[in-house]
Image (cartoon, rainbow, N blue to C red):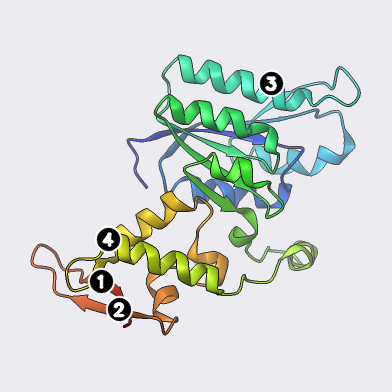
Amino acid sequence: MQADIKIAVLIDADNVPSNQVKEMMEEVAKYGNPTIKRIYGDWTKPQLGKWKNVLLENAINPIQQYGYTSGKNATDSAMIIDAMDILYTSRVDGFCLVSSDSDFTKLATRLREAGLMVIGMGEKKTPDPFIVACDKFIYLEILQKDGDGPEDNKERTKTRPQVDKINPKLIRLISSTISDLADDDGWAFMGDVGNLLQKKQPNFDSRNYGFQKLTPLIGSINKFEVEQRENQKGKYKLIYVRNKV
């Protein structure tokens, strides 16, 4: 976690599941300190009742937003207005927008234009325009963990999707990225490869394919060579990768 990076976490209660709040906040903590945590919804609606039990545990501030007009999403408007207020007060270094709704595409684009980091979180049904508008997009499905009780386990297992398959499109993406960064011998530093993959495809995440880290993902594909090298400046070895000839 980079404690000096302040992040505003804004959650759309209407478009994300309530049983993953803890995992969401743990993921955000990898990128910075969530100094502002707000969740938006009409809390008079029975379907949002599940959220109420977890908000206090995670110190998330619920923002009440009534649906003034049928067919209009007042929650989206309130969340967007708050985000712009936070932006102009210069209180944070980045935003985490938690929603599966493409209505936040323009907001993500505007925040990035202002030079702020934007992390998106949502389900795999999230439309592509919102995904590519973020610096990084994380699918909530890969954050799922087994709960404490049988009912919680049952609910999570029921919604857990299959791991994505390693396909030719992914292999081409990795291969072209390695080529973009390769030295004269074809080797590229794994950390640089990961950073460029993220820029090319914001929803790229090794966890989507069942691997916790990038190195074992690439190492599982026989199209690439992985090499560890001694690090003269630290105790951790440096990892390099290249395309097989």
Residue bearing the label numbered 1: 240
Label 4: few (<14), some or many (≥20) within 10 Å?
Answer: some
Q: Which residue is identified by label 4?
A: 181
Q: Residue at x 25, y 71 (%)?
A: 239
Question: Looking at numbered disc 1 in the image, what kind of residue is underneath it?
Answer: Tyr
Q: Quick check: 5 left or right of 63? A: left
Which numbered circle lies on residue 78? 3
Residue identified by numbered label 2? 226
Q: Secondary structure at mark 1?
A: strand
* Circles 3 and 4 in contact, beta carbons < 8 Å: no
Residue type at mark 3: give it: Ala
User: Position of 104 compared to 51: left or right?
Assistant: left
Residue drawn at point x = 66 percent, y = 40 percent: 99
Please state which of residues 143 and 230 is positioned toward the viewer in this rendering.
230
C-beta proximity under 8 Å, tags 2 and 1: yes
**Near-viewer residue (233 or 191):** 191
| Label 3: few (<14), some (14–19) or many (≥20) C-alpha neighbours in 10 Å | some
The residues tagged by marks 3 and 1 sit, at their Cα atoms, a distance apart of 46 Å
Q: Quadrant of the C terminus?
A: bottom left
